[in-house]
Image (tube, grey):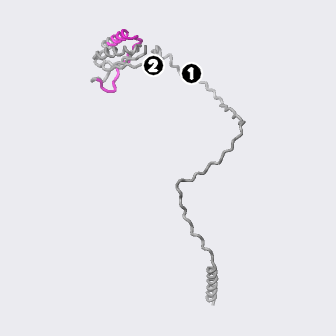
Amino acid sequence: MKLYQLITIISESADEKEITTISKKIQELLKQKAKFESYNDLGRKKLAYQIKKNQFGSYLVFKFSAEAADLAGINSELKTNPKIIRFMIVSSPVKIEPVKNPKKLIKKTEDVKIEKEIKPVEKPAPEKVTEPVKSIAPAKIVKPALKIKKEKKPPKPEITQEMESEKERMKKIEEELDKILEE
């Protein structure tokens, strides 16, 4: 047998007496077709959106154990009641027991003592390497796929005899000009 929860929403037109009779009918149905465990009335709440022209609904939660084959019979019985506007059967992974006195579980901050101890974290010493270290070959340099062309400077002209003679001739001309300017 597997644990299940049945969540039902009862129409806003139902009064308290009708809600109790509906819950008793559902409990009897679960006792006949499954093993009934607990019941919780969550009260009247506003719905997130209208369901069958209802803006409010009374939520009832039932917990029970049943075989998967019995769920179809429970489903069909719940569909026949017009006051139940929505219902859903969900499997529970763990048996949930209601807390009888939740105030006892909550402790005041005055009663709780906080003790905190800070311990330094110790790192283990690294182990010594006993194996010789193998030499590592240098990495190969990979040339880029695209080659960038560099602009080449024109080669320097070689100094020839003609150029030398031209230089000497220019020097002589400059000297003659300087003499003329001095006069």
The residue at which mark 1 appears reads as 112
Q: Would you say residue 130 is visible in this rendering?
A: yes
**Neighbours of disc 2 within 10 Å: few (<14), some (14-19), many (20+):** few
The residue mark sitting in front, 2 or 1, is 2
Q: Residue 29 at x, y = what percent?
A: 34, 11
**Quadrant position of the N terminus in the picture:** top left
Q: Residue 6 at x, y = what percent?
A: 38, 17
Name the image quarter holding residue 38: top left
> For residue 157, which numbered disc appears in the image?
none
User: 179 or 18, which is in the foreground?
Assistant: 179
Q: Would you say residue 40 is visible in this rendering?
A: no
**Neighbours of disc 1 within 10 Å: few (<14), some (14-19), many (20+):** few
Q: Is residue 152 magenta?
A: no
Q: Residue at x 35, y 18 (%)?
A: 8
Name the image quarter holding residue 41: top left
* Vertical position of residue 149 compared to residue 110: above or below: below
15 relative position to 67: left or right = left
Q: Residue at x 48, y 17 (%)?
A: 103
Looking at the rendered structure, the kind of residue marked 1 is Val
**Quadrant position of the C terminus in the picture:** bottom right
The residue at which mark 2 appears reads as 93
Bounds of the magenta segment: 22-51
